[in-house]
Image (cartoon, grey):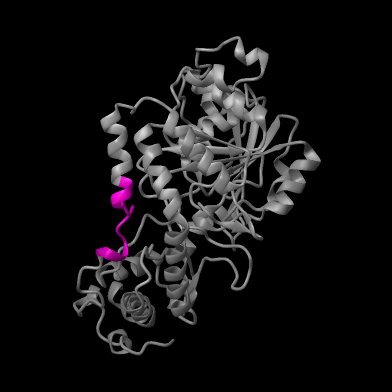
Amino acid sequence: MVFDTTSQLINQPLALLGGPPVIETSNDHLFHWPIISDRAERAVLDILRNGQMSAWNVTQEFERDFATYQGTQFALGFPNGTMSLLAAMYGIGIGQGDEIIAPSLTYWASVMPIFSLRGNVVFADNNPTTLCLSPTDIERHITPRTKAILVVHYGGHPCDMDPILEIASQHRLKVIEDVSHAHGGLYKGRIVGSLGNVGCFSLNSIKPLGVGEAGLICTNDREILERAIAFSDYGRHAELLTNPQLRKISGVSLGGVKGRMNQLCAALGRIQLSDYPARMAEIQGALHRFCDLLEGCPGLRAHRTPKGSDSTMGGWYNPLGFYNSRELSGLPVERFTAALGAEGVKLMGGCNLPLHLHPAFNTADIYNDGIPTRLAHSDRDLRQPPGSLPHAENTPGRTFCIPWFKRDDPAEIERHAAAYWKVALQANTLLNDEK
């Protein structure tokens, strides 16, 4: 522990128990997001003044910019990340009874769209170190109905892609990457979202690359691109479709939905993308500074890629750490988090709860089939009971939130780290007070 200016704060009484908080003044500048420059405002105003809100010329420019950034041949814009995942699933050919293998530890939007295609999801466990889909828990779930593996670069941490790509190749499966937490992240020096058959991105305003509300897919596979276009982007059929079967339905959305990105978001996105590398570098510098200060703190360990590796956390969305209650006298993580809040620490939502235990995947009859939707288009009961995915089930209780710094302000970051040390070093006091 190295604190030159805040060590005296660590030994003061806990704010939750009446002491002074470590962070007493406003620190909104550390967390304000997205950053909208004058140049970004002008780009959006140009669209408004030209009446181009429902066109797609600027969206196409943004798609070209994003494909270049990702190093892929194609990119296609959508109104949100959930729609991009639905289009990607249709793009790889998901249909009735088809299954994807996906991590249980993720946001619902990663997998819920498959029900719209009458397909199904089979959940696999996460790696307890990366929090991403575990390569060692995939093959036991593969059946003749399996069409794809969906990975999520969770909390910004890149998934272990090499063994997953090898499994997919051996079993002739497609790989979808959900990159909604990891814009700009690297896996062994390669940008995530370009490694599988198709990468999907959410670009809503709270994401590392925030443009309001939008989504994108990236791919090198023209068939996936054209199927995704035909599914929801009817206005661009004649221009981009080469598949004669798809061209026959030109002018009609096969998915019955309109999936184009709003041009206001596209205009903003072009500017945000050009500014993103510098902003991402500052986020990474700030988060590494904080995590370095946390090293050695009892019960706490950061969730990040190994130092010196060529894998990175990108924009580090929803930063997390690992919590060991045994090192903190058995203090529950909820009590620890409450104490942090009293010290003035601003926290995001934290770890997702495992989806395989959620009623939507066990009892919900979404489309009035008379049975749970999870069973309606399957040849067997795919529901996974408590205890079936132990790492996913245990992860929420062994993780804690880390502030998502957008500015690398050494003094303020040190003050935040001091709050964590203060609570951790006084865990006994908290536990005794609770009793």
- Name the residue: 25% across, 74% down: 23
- Name the residue: 51% across, 53% down: 182
- Name the residue: 31% across, 65% down: 30
- Name the residue: 47% across, 44% down: 107
- Tell me which segment is drawn in magenta: 28-40
Could you tell me if residue 412 is visible in this image? yes
- Which quadrant would residue 247 be assigned to in this image? top right
Question: Is residue 39 a member of the stretch shown in magenta?
Answer: yes
Viewer-nearest residue: 229 or 73:
73
Quadrant containing the C terminus is bottom left
Query: Which residue extends farthest right?
Result: 170
Q: Position of residue 429 (x, y in %)?
A: 32, 81
Q: Is residue 177 above or below residue 226?
A: below
Q: Is residue 145 above or below residue 134?
A: above
In the displayed structure, does residue 402 sit left or right of residue 76? left
Q: Position of residue 233 (x, y in %)?
A: 49, 23
Q: Position of residue 75 (x, y in %)?
A: 55, 37
Viewer-nearest residue: 390 or 418:
418
Q: Position of residue 370 (x, y in %)?
A: 49, 18
Question: Is residue 400 a member of the stretch shown in magenta?
Answer: no
Quadrant containing the N terminus is bottom left
